Amino acid sequence: MSIAERAQQIVKEFELTPEQLNACVDHFIWATEHGLRHHTDLGMPMIPTYVTSIPTGKEKGTFLAADLGGTNFRVCSVNLHGDSTYALVHNKWPVPRELMSGKCDDFMGWLTDRLEEFLKEHHSEHYSQENCQWGDHLFKMGFTFSFPVDQTGMNRGTLIRWTKGFDIKDAVGKDVCQLFQSAINKRKLPVFVAALVNDTVGTLMSRSYTKAEEGRTLIGCIFGTGTNGAYSEKIKAIPKFNIVAHPEITSKIMVINTEWGSFDNRLKFIPSNRFDQELNLHTPNPGYHMFEKRISGMFLGELLRLCLVELQKDGLLFGAADRIDKTINALETPWSVDSSFPSKIHGDTTTELLGTESIVRQLLGYATTLEQRKAIQAIAKAIGRRGAHLSAVPLAGLILHTHALEKFEGNIDIGADGSVVEFYPHHEEMIREALRWTKIGDQENRITIGLARDGSGVGAALCALVA
Ligand code: BGC
């Protein structure tokens, strides 16, 4: 069999028909309603966040935000001007790999060291060099912690499980805000962790703050290393939330962190091929976040790598004679290529696919023929297209569940953030194509999808403010 034919077989394995997509959307609506009623282990968590108001753009003040999302840790100081604008300074550090699966104390200590470094650099006005002490000013901080947490208060929540490659075992089941606060207190830093914020909640808040004039933001979502979304729900439609136990909450709505990465963990409707199954086995959370494993940045590169390994085993590419750089072992090394790999290949429009030639050479260390590159590109596109089409499922699901198209006039706005939505070629276009396949149909043109940069910074600051 030629490599082109073999590639077509693999492409077929990544195909998703409009019928399958619509079955996923229907199931998503069911899972949404089920998750609002029940605490589930395998189902979609649908976590009440205790955030009961959406910004109007008039909020003011200076707040800190600490953001642990995936590969990086960021500390920001955000000055909200009260007119939908803000000023932000931030420092960012990659999280050392060994800490991602080490001890919780070491990890919290590392976060706190970075926070102290940030405060000394950007808020030295509150630090007395003479006494080596911080003054009386207490910063309120929003902690954007983008992992599934069972939230029990605005700044309380126990870690359900790690995702995105983290595996700090002794943190699971503990209150991440308290852990951070006690590490901060040990260092005597003037910081109060006022709010625990998922990055999607932050995205919803920041998009609402900055785009308040342009109408209602229905969903805040992330398509990056991981994926997830948040929206606001009527409290009376959240039967599992015990309002009587929280007399302080008088509001009618509450933001829900859906944790849609865990949609259909049982794989009843979402597609699952050999490569998906192989990938899942080598994650720290097998059987969970199965939806995320088909669409988010952490996994797209790995899926492509697994397909290429198969083509190599079949003797169709990457033979010994094609090896240019023997020091590169990425093809044999799980998780060694991220989503920028399929993304660059997908977006390569040169006739000879020279962009693909160069990235395969650089990342994998092999020379390729044009025919091989065409096969690689066809597979990369199939993986990317399936990911983007599936990304439309929760968006359509929430739009239909909330009846937003009938209830609101004008546009329905979605604030989105993350490397995949920002950089993956044609991502939004492919999402829109799939939205048109659903019951939304032509009304897809009423949906605006806008990048909400800094959701986890500005949004966390807004949550610290309302806390
Ligand atoms: C986490 C979510 C997060 C998403 C995007 C997922 O793996 O479970 O909490 O919002 O990644 O960062």
Image: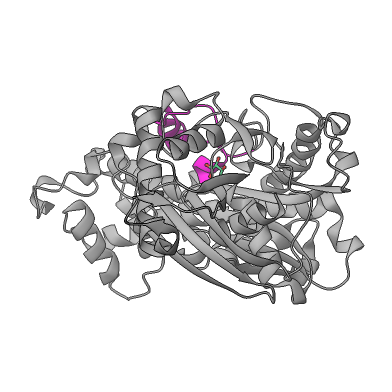
Q: Give the range drawn in magenta.
A: 270-294
The one of 17 and 461 positioned closer to us in this rendering: 461
Q: Is residue 46 above or below residue 385?
A: above
Which residue is found at the position 45% from the left and 59% from the top? 126
Which residue is found at the position 10% from the left and 46% from the top? 320
Q: Can residue 384 be seen in this view?
A: yes
Q: Is residue 31 above or below residue 85?
A: above
**Where ligand 1 lies, by image quadrant?**
top right
Identify the colour scheme used. one colour
Which residue is found at the position 49% from the left and 51% from the top? 66
Count of number-bearing discs: 0
Residue 116 location, x and y as percent?
Answer: 38, 50
Left or right, 353 with respect to 60, comes to left
Q: Quadrant of residue 256?
A: top right
290 falls in the magenta region: yes
Q: Which residue lies furthest to the front in this view?
A: 130
Q: Quadrant of residue 211?
A: bottom right
The one of 207 and 394 positioned closer to us in this rendering: 207
Residue 122 location, x and y as percent?
Answer: 41, 64
Q: Can residue 6 be seen in this view?
A: no
Q: Is residue 149 above or below residue 93?
A: above
152 falls in the magenta region: no
Which residue is found at the position 39% from the left and 49% from the top? 133
Residue 437 location, x and y as percent?
Answer: 72, 58
The one of 397 and 303 positioned closer to us in this rendering: 397
Residue 377 location, x and y as percent?
Answer: 37, 60
The one of 121 and 299 positioned closer to us in this rendering: 121
Left or right, 352 with respect to 172, comes to left
